[in-house]
Amino acid sequence: MMEQTIQWKGPGLTRVPFAVYTDNQAAAQEQERIYRGETWNYLCLEADLPESGSFRTTFVGDTPVVVVKDDDGEIYAFENRCAHRGALIALEKSGKVDGFQCVYHAWSYNRQGDLTGVAFEAGVKGQGGMAKSFCKEDHGPRKLRVAVYCGLVFGSFSEDVPGIEDYLGPEICQRIERVLHKPVEVIGRFTQALPNNWKLYMENVKDSYHASLLHLFFTTFELNRLSQKGGLIVDESGGHHVSYSMTDPDAADESYKQQGIRSDDSKYRLKDPSVLAGFKEYDDGITLQILSVFPGFVLQQIQNCLAVRQVLPKGQERSELNWTYIGYTDDTPEQRKVRLKQQNLVGPAGFISMEDGAVGGFVQRGIAGAQGLEAIIEMGGDQAASSEGRATEASVRGFWKAYRHHMCA
Amino acid sequence: MIDLLALCAFNASYANAIDSEALEQWPAFFTEACTYRITNVENEKEGLPSGIVYADSRAMLEDRIAALREANIYERHRYRHLLGIPLVESARDDQAVARTPFLVARIMATGETMVFATGEYHDRFVMDGGKLLLAERVAVCDSTVTDTLMALPL
Ligand code: FES
Ligand SMILES: [Fe+2]
């Protein structure tokens, strides 16, 4: 096993060595201990695989993976790497197949990832061919364990990782369930290339401290609610979190009134506020819920804009953020329109999230030459616990708690 | 009839408004009720309706520019649009449908220039009070990947 190269000073969670975002050996260890370790990694939506034979290619960390539905209705996942010489087995992002055949030397695989055919296995005219002892069953791409939860397909390389519901814990399960309680369909996919380490994006997602400081859209356009109730959930492992808030109907009335008064002399207001006109979708009154699952999954409900995000490392200083916008299959045309309009809030051009694409890069560039120094993550104390207030970095500390658990174990 | 030259001239001044950072002029290229959307070839092929920008009124475009000026935070940069010749699908006195290829380079404050987006505008032009305007422009990007963020319109 590789030596731990990053020096964590002390057992606390409030200091993060900047080297974790730049060190190449740490990146290699993450692949082994986190992505191939005891974690569940988001692969795709069940809705992405509508029929038997439907497949999608994706990644677990930097490992290419194929996810495919077979005739038995089950979903299988295996490394997208030919058992022969290692070429990619599936080249397209998605499609429908009976089975797979590697283009290089035409070895073939079924939908469950078993090696089923070796071209010229018996040679040609008695010449060549594989050794008699070669047994196809012994060879094949490595298979992942697959778990489907509320329409989310997760995969794991670990035999020891607990079942998905135990991995997520009851609070996170309940919060996934409240959004994904009925069938969804994909309404758009976009990828953002981020100029920073994947961990900086995950920290940003968990950082409820920055939201009203960095994203000025709501305040500038006088759209923020005066008093919002909400809270922060950090699971036992630290790795998963939920940040949520709800519009208090009483406070909303007050803020609307105030807006009315100030609108005369306020220069900047939305000329077309329909971008924010939503509809009540959930009985609990929660209008915003950001949920993350360690290491790189995010489920988002921002008013009526629903999306899943997959964060993937692409080397130490680049990462990829895959957005999949969803709606429910039983949306009315009006509801669908609302979701489409509210997508202006998020994504690469989002009014309240375009900045998130940039700040990670600001950190990545800022920490050049800061190998011996550390970040301070002390807002709201030193614990990684749930709370009612959101002026805290508790869930960011939770991320490091989980990270260190996997990396140092 | 709306002719090719009129469409070329329209596109030239559209690109100039964005590239010369006269962003406040940009919404005026559209009709009051309009569609402006930025998407990519994969979503188009699958018929997925989302956009990373999705507007159905000129007022929404004005709001976007106001937000860029007043609220959003991003590093200073500008674009250079290179627009191809519109492929006119239909043209009448009061309406035209065309596709125009674009290449947009992004010039960062650091001085670095990179190809930021290529694709095709899918347009519906109308004559509105004697003026040529866009009733619909869907910018279909060839790449599914956006580098860092997209602040300025395409
Ligand atoms: S590498 Fe796939 S068949 Fe040879
Ligand atoms: Fe943010």
Image: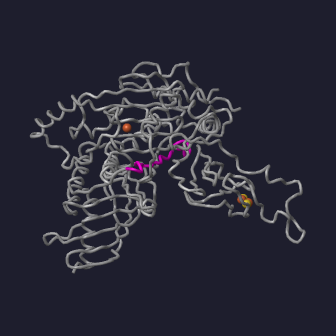
Q: Which of the pair A353/A39 is nearer the observer? A: A39
| Quadrant of the rendering where the N terminus of chain A is positioned | top right
Q: Which of the colour schemes (rainbow, by chain, secondary structure, one colour) is used?
A: one colour
Residue A391, located in which quarter of the rendered image? top left
Question: In this rendering, is residue A269 above or below A66?
Answer: above
Residue A108 as seen in the image, left or right of residue A315: right
Q: Which residues are magenta?
A: A312-330
Q: Which of the pair A321/A72 is nearer the observer? A: A72
**So how many labels did they put on this image?**
0
Residue drawn at (34%, 66%) of the image:
B121
Ligand 1 in which quarter: bottom right
Q: Is residue A168 magenta?
A: no
Residue A391 as seen in the image, left or right of residue A183: left
Estimate the x, y position of residue A178 in percent, counting from the top left: 42, 36
Magenta span: chief secondary structure: strand
Residue A373 seen: no
